Amino acid sequence: MRSADPLIVGAGPAGCAAAIALARAGARPLLLDRSAEVGDPLCGGFMSWRTLAQLEGLGVRLADLGGHRVDQLRLFAKGREARVPLPQPALGLSRHALDSRMRETALATGARLEVDTIRTLAPGMAKGQRQDWQAESLFLATGKHDVRGQSRPRASAKPALGLRLRLPSEPTREALLDGAIELHLFDGGYVGIVLQEGGSANICMAVRKSALAASNGDPAALVERLGEDNPSLAARLGSDWRDARIESIGAVPYGHIARQTEAGIFRLGDQAAVIPSLAGEGMAIAVASGALAARHWLDGGAAAAPVFQREFASRASRPIRLASIGWRLVESHLGSRAALALAGIAPGIVRQFAEMARIPPPASLARR
């Protein structure tokens, strides 16, 4: 099948943001996704104030989804705690709820959806399990999952992986996490926790493989050990975490930025830039990249892809650089102690750091 409008591979936040922006301008983009049912991806779940502003600019409404308002960052390490007000309110919301609303909005705006598993991608062609899809412009929005023919580099001396637990609503846990997003720091990684709709707790971990290896490669043993070493984390985990499924994704290329691309291939979201998750800016990067790619395509068609990629790489460089510095700092014992001391003595600096680690939105999505 050949399409004059862009084919968007992946109907997550980046792909749907592009689809909404394109459809609003009169195009009829085609979203390709491997599932007709919206899932609940491992990564994401925290909507920064920048993400919320961009979604509002796209007309994606979240107010009725029951997300958890977040006003404060709490840091924990080695029995110490620091609290810092966020620059602006944020939101805890599951990826299932966000992705469902964004897909609904894209389709209501005029985008189309087809279900297929794309196996290989090349300029002008997406080879699927069902059929081959042809278009002059392909928007690659497959998140952290690569497609053959367009894989990202993964070389790293200290590879990282992501783990996630989703715990049900529980009164004690809800009271502990009310109004906050928490980062529990340990040698070799960190645990991020935020409440989401219905009072469920989303617990995401970014860990070096060396930290997992110290627990014999067993994620459950790692969580057990972290709870034993960190009483505050144990209080949030409760006793029901052992009943939860631990999901994982390996070899996450944190710090990756796509600085170039071929004509006709627009790389969005985590295919464009992968920010360390402690920044809580992954969803903003996804939405900003989709909207900016749409604007470039509307102005210049398939030939605009390299220009878009360079501009987006420039926008993403500072937040990713700062988040990477922060990650390297907090994953060491001395660094985490220094971070908590700074948060206690000069919380304004931490708030400024949090503001600077946001990606500048395209002008069309800036809050007016």
Image (tube, helix red, strand yellow):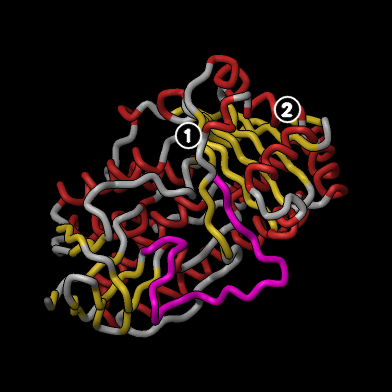
**Magenta stretch secondary structure, dominant:** loop
Q: What residue is rendered at 29% in x and 47% in y? A: 38
Q: What residue is rendered at 25% in x and 78% in y? A: 127
Residue 163, how many percent across, how many down?
A: 57, 48
**In this image, 165 relative to 295: left or right?**
right
Residue range in magenta is: 142-164
Q: What residue is rendered at 61% in x and 30% in y? A: 72
Residue 304 visible (yes or no): no
**Figure quadrant of residue 230:** top right
- Tag 1 secondary structure: strand
| Magenta run includes residue 152 | yes
- Tag 2 secondary structure: helix
User: From this viewpoint, which residue is outermost toward the right?
Assistant: 334
- Classify the position of the C terminus by image quarter: top left
Residue 197, how many percent across, how many down?
A: 41, 28
- Classify the position of the N terminus by image quarter: bottom left
Observer-nearest of 186 and 13:
186
Residue 290, how many percent across, how many down?
A: 35, 61
Query: Pointer 2: what residue?
Result: 232
Query: Pointer 1: what residue?
Result: 92
The correct choice, above or below, for 98 with respect to 67 in the image is below
Task: State the separation of the CA atoms marked 2 and 1.
Answer: 20 Å
The correct choice, above or below, for 108 with respect to 77 in the image is below
Q: Which mark is residue 172?
A: none
Observer-nearest of 264 and 145:
145
